[in-house]
Image (spheres, rainbow, N blue to C red):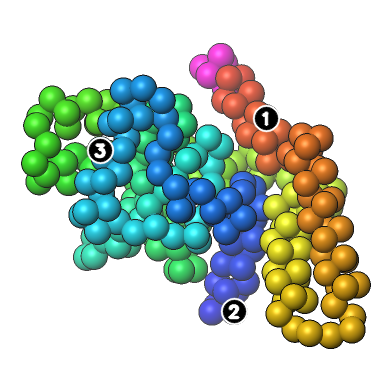
Amino acid sequence: MQIKGLYNSVLDNLYGSMMFANAITHPKAWLGRPKAEGAEGDLQNILFNELRDYGFKRTPFQIVFPKQTVGIIYPIKDDPRGVTEAHVRFYSTGEVHCELEVGRYDPQHYSGPRYDGKEFLENILEESELVIPTQQKILDLVVDKDYSYLCARIDENPLYQNLKSRAVGTFAFMLYRHGLGTVGLLGGLTACATPSEANPAIFGFFGCIALMQATGEFLGLNIAGHQVDLYHEVRKINQSSD
């Protein structure tokens, strides 16, 4: 049973990391700040500062969802629902999403329970020194985004069904799309740090990999993006049939 659980955890993490980009290859998502424009951006930054003062941390180990500018996390203790972490993401659209989930290092991270964390943020704001009108304006930005649902290997996820229907081609391209740039970067750094006559060839090899990924980016070859579009089309169809 433990082996099966570990196997499923590996598959969950692999699938989740291939669906979207990650903060390791998109460092602005964990080193940056909210970047929405206008009053919404100002409110996002006020919330960001409050959460950082409260104890929220930056982390490179997170999935980066479409239009996400930055994400921060906070540990949760003794929650009867089984969640152990709050993950707040800020979006360039001015929106904010707080998700209560099983921690990133837990085998149940993708398959475990998830809850909307707007009330969690509301409690934090109530403890702050912000005036009530400002608190309310911030809470008006908090929405429930269901991107995490798209990272789950469940039959109810239309993207997972789509992936299984053309598994080999889609998996290979998504691996290329999100994985090779990381491999190229690490390989190039390793080649530079280890003097050897073969280094120029090694560095050139990994450089070609990175160039291939950059070319794919330029051409707009983004399977994950296409799958998100498919998901929203499926939602429209389901809503129109209700």
Q: Secondary structure at mark 3?
A: helix
Numbered disc 2: secondary structure: helix
Q: CA distance from mark 3 to mark 1?
A: 35 Å
**Residue lying at 35% horizontally and 30% vertically, measured from the top left:** 41
Task: Report the residue that reaches farthest toward the top.
Answer: 240
Mark 1, residue position: 230
Q: Does any portion of residue 85 appear in the rendered image? A: no
Task: Answer whether labels 2 and 1 touch (C-beta < 8 Å).
Answer: no
**N-term-proximal mark, 2 vs 1:** 2
In this rendering, the label closer to the viewer, 3 or 1: 3
Q: Is residue 48 left or right of residue 10?
A: left
Q: Earlier in the sequence, mark 3 or mark 2?
A: 2
179 horizontally vs 231: left or right: right
Specify the quadrant of the image occupied by residue 150.
Answer: top right
Secondary structure beneath label 1? helix
Q: Amino acid at mark 2?
A: Ile
Q: Which residues are magenta?
A: 238-242
Tell me where residue 241 appears, x and y as whole percent. 57, 16
- Above or below residue 222? Residue 188 is below
